Amino acid sequence: MMNAVTRGGKRRLGVMGGTFDPIHHGHLVAASEVAHHFQLDEVVFVPTGRPWQKAEQAVSAPEDRYLMTVIATASNPRFSVSRVDIDRPGPTFTIDTLRDVSQIYGHETEIYFITGADALAHILTWRDVDELFKIAHFVGCTRPGHVLHDPGLPEGKVSLIEIPALAISSSECRARVGAGEPIWYLVPDGIVQYINKRGLYRPRESEGMGGC
Ligand code: ATP
Ligand code: MG
């Protein structure tokens, strides 16, 4: 069984949802910091299917994002990756992620949903917000320089944790690749190689050439 009980208490599972387009060291440091702080037994990374907040934006194929997440987390015995969101048709809502994860890992598991403080600021607009707080404790990671204005979150259900000096974002990584700039050390080495191998984030040759 996956859900062995540890330290005589409930098993503690971190759930890190994200587009991971691409996964970068900000995500990995955030997961590692939260795991240490809350003594988590495991962190499962869950690449989104179609993120409803990013519906207007072109997002890389789920399989590429899934594989990059596997490559980036493979060396950590406490990190794993779940396909629940990419295998579920339709846009991804966190409530579905948490329902599926809690079913897979068992109800005896304490779930910590790890998310950026930027996303947390909008959590009250998420689908089935009351049930969200019943299933999971929420951990908001603040990026350097980010100030969270209290969005009226329920007391005791949300913790904030500051992630050291990592102002890395996937958008910045994509922009750098598009501009021919290096992303070495912003993402794990295997991710640089995977992006090159698959030609991700490069402008297509016809773009900007007046259709010639
Ligand atoms: P994009 O720039 O495309 O929005 P992103 O870098 O925010 O991408 P996501 O896949 O959207 O990456 O993020 C997944 C989760 O990780 C979100 O909750 C996000 O707020 C959080 N996150 C992203 N970057 C960092 C970072 N550097 N430190 C801590 N948390 C982060
Ligand atoms: Mg983001």
Image: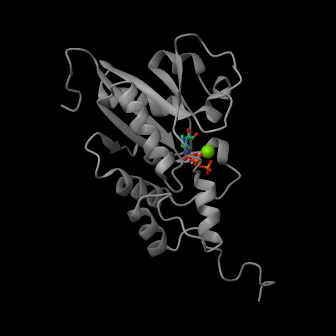
Which quadrant, please, contains the N terminus?
top left
182 relative to 104 in the view: left or right = right
Question: Nearest the camera: 84 or 160?
Answer: 160
Asked if residue 88 shows in the view, the reply is no
Report the residue at 32% width, 42% height from top.
79
Spot the residue most to the bottom. Answer: 212
Spot the residue most to the front. Answer: 165
Image spot of residue 170 (x, y percent): 58, 54
151 relative to 92 in the view: left or right = right
Report the residue at 32% width, 24% height from top.
12
Residue 38's place in the image compared with 66, above or below, is above
Question: Nearest the camera: 161 or 5?
Answer: 161
Image spot of residue 153 (x, y percent): 63, 16
Report the residue at 70% width, 20% height from top.
151
Residue 188's place in the image compared with 81, above or below, is below
Spot the residue most to the top. Answer: 155
Which quadrant, please, contains the C terminus?
bottom right
Residue 117's place in the image compared with 89, above or below, is above
50 relative to 6 in the view: left or right = right
Report the residue at 41% width, 42% height from top.
45
Q: How is the image coloured?
A: one colour
Image spot of residue 109 (x, y percent): 32, 21
Image spot of residue 115 (x, y percent): 53, 34
Q: Which quadrant of the picture is home to ligand 2?
A: top right
